[in-house]
Amino acid sequence: MISIFSSIYSRFKENWVAYAFMAPLVIFLLIFGAYPVLNVIVLSFFKLDLYESFQRVFHGLAGYRKILFQDPHFWRVLSNTAIYSFGSTILQVFVGFLAAWLLSKKIKGRAIFRGIMLIPWVTPIIVVGIAWRWMLNPSVGMLNFYLSKIGIINNYIAWLGNETTIWPVLLIISTWKGYPYMALMMLAGIQDVPESLLESASMDGANALQKIRYVVLPIIKPILLITALTATLLTWNNFRFIYAMTKGGPGYSTTTISIYIQSRSFQDFKLGEGAVIATLSFLVLLAFTVVYIRRGGLEAQ
Amino acid sequence: MRHNKLSFIDRNTAELRKSIIHLLRRSLLYLALLLLSVFTLLPFLWLIISSLKPSTAIFSEIPRWIPRNVTLENYLWAFGPKGVDFLELFKNTLIVSSLSALLSGTLSSLAAYGLSRFRFPGYRITGIFILVFQMFTGPVVIVSWYNIAQVFNIYDTYIVLILAYTAFTSPVITWLLRGYFQDIPEALEEAALVDGCNKLQALYHVVLPVAAPGLITSVLFAFVLSWNDYIYALSLAGKNAKTLQVGIGELVGFFGQTQWGGVMASGVLTALPVVIIFIFLQKRLVSGLTAGAVKE
């Protein structure tokens, strides 16, 4: 027994400098990173409705039953989140790859193009919301003006106001906002592809598509998979984009899980139910991540 | 003789064809890049142009790319009493974002240095622990932050936002910095240790000066991430600590129909600081972010 302690002590003594460097951040994250997560999970088993009382009352799984089986919007919200998260990620991978492929060529002014590309990524979301809502404005927006001028549409369309156009439009804007990051990561990968491999593929008569399919993709696959995973998780948890564009409306047609958590907690003040939705969302993400990592063969990394 | 001449012509036309194809491909490439840039910049360009027009011209049915009268009335409105009280919101956002970026930078640089220089028992698990907290930010934990704010009586203060921002930026910044530190040869510190410095002195006197550009980049990146937050400020701050994004967001709701010009001007002003910062650190940030992805 004593020997175990003394061996732990001696290992600690050998490494105390390293621990001293790590400690501030680790302690900070235990308090302000781990505690909030645990607290949400614990809270999900309590009833806490600030309109009724400031006391939490334990009620076991009742909150889960309510959200899963009686909540009129939960499943809609979940499917909205899936559309948003997977839809944006897939589109971002495509456009991001295209941009990365173009930028990987020997071109003049690559830095300028890259700089331009990254502006949407870094711009505050509320400004993105203003800019796009202005372009899409039903009565004086330029999109309606030009589309009707070239005869694609006859009547002006409220792009963000009806259920047929709202998701396609939101996905396009989300892609516009997120593709630069994707492109950067993939560009880094493509630049690692040996020039000689591409040349010998050209010698063998491969066209651009074949080169991408058989030479580039296998090499950048690990980066692609990891970046796509990160993007999926980040969009899944992304509150501000939808909030700035539509606030989840009209009705519940674009409400995603993060919007739902926020409004349940801070408009209805049902913090307990907010915690249930958050925990469920976290479980879905965890399951997705595990399956993704297994299927994608990312375990080795 | 004749044969030679023919092949000479052949070679010429073949080369000509080759160079034409090359030229075509190049122009296609630039055309594609140009289209991508237009798609990327158009909304902002239009926002800036519109914000410079008088209100009557903003709502004209025909989009006019070059405004007849350029005016700053919308910008004056944004600063004025009817607008968002821009300066107050700007001050709040600036204080919260900078202090959080500094705190995040301090905690993260120590940890990143530890991760890049030592292999200690628990190295992997610590690394994963730090990474995992990138997943648990924003809406998932917002309820807990509300509780924290109430328990410590810090709701609607700078402190709660600084802590929340540090919690969500520090994992990202740590990984970014770890990459920068790994690029600094350990021989530098070894030399300092031989000269009688201790580890902390070596970090302070030898590593930090070399790492300064990366460090500044990371701190500014943390600043931009905090500046761009919406959900924490919306849920944890009321009147006193309200940030720009939330303030402008309310503005869109109130004046969405009547004061588009003012709303747009406020938007341009909100984007300006981060876009400027970003232009300066673009190159280094890009190499830092992608290096992390490639090396992992």
Image: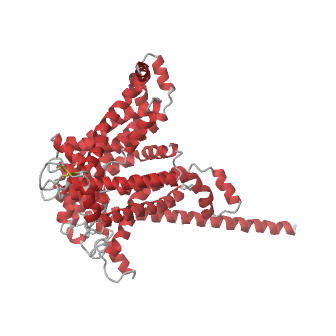
Determine whether, in the image, residue A7 is placed left or right of residue A101.
left
Give the answer, above or below, for where B125 lies relative to A63.
above
Instruction: Work out whether residue B256 or residue A51 is closer to the camera in this orientation and state it.
Output: A51
Q: Can residue A122 be seen in this view?
A: no
Quarter of the image for the N terminus of chain B: give it.
bottom right
Q: Which residue lies furthest to the top in this view?
A: B196
Determine whether, in the image, residue B274 is placed left or right of residue A298.
left
- In percent of width and height, residue B290 lies at 47, 47
Instruction: Work out whether residue A125 or residue A24 is closer to the camera in this orientation and state it.
Output: A24
- In percent of width and height, residue B50 lies at 28, 66
Q: How many labels does the image show?
A: 0
- In percent of width and height, residue A295 lies at 51, 55
Instruction: Work out whether residue A59 or residue A83 is closer to the camera in this orientation and state it.
Output: A59
Instruction: Work out whether residue A100 or residue A250 is closer to the camera in this orientation and state it.
Output: A250
Give the answer, above or below, for where B123 lies relative to B269.
above
**Residue at horizontal 35 percent and vertical 73 percent from the top:** A165
Q: Can residue A99 be seen in this view?
A: yes
- In percent of width and height, residue B74 lies at 20, 61
**Residue at horizontal 12 percent and vertical 52 percent from the top:** A53
* Colour scheme: secondary structure
**Residue at horizontal 45 percent and vertical 36 percent from the top:** B124
Q: Which residue lies furthest to the right in this view?
A: B1
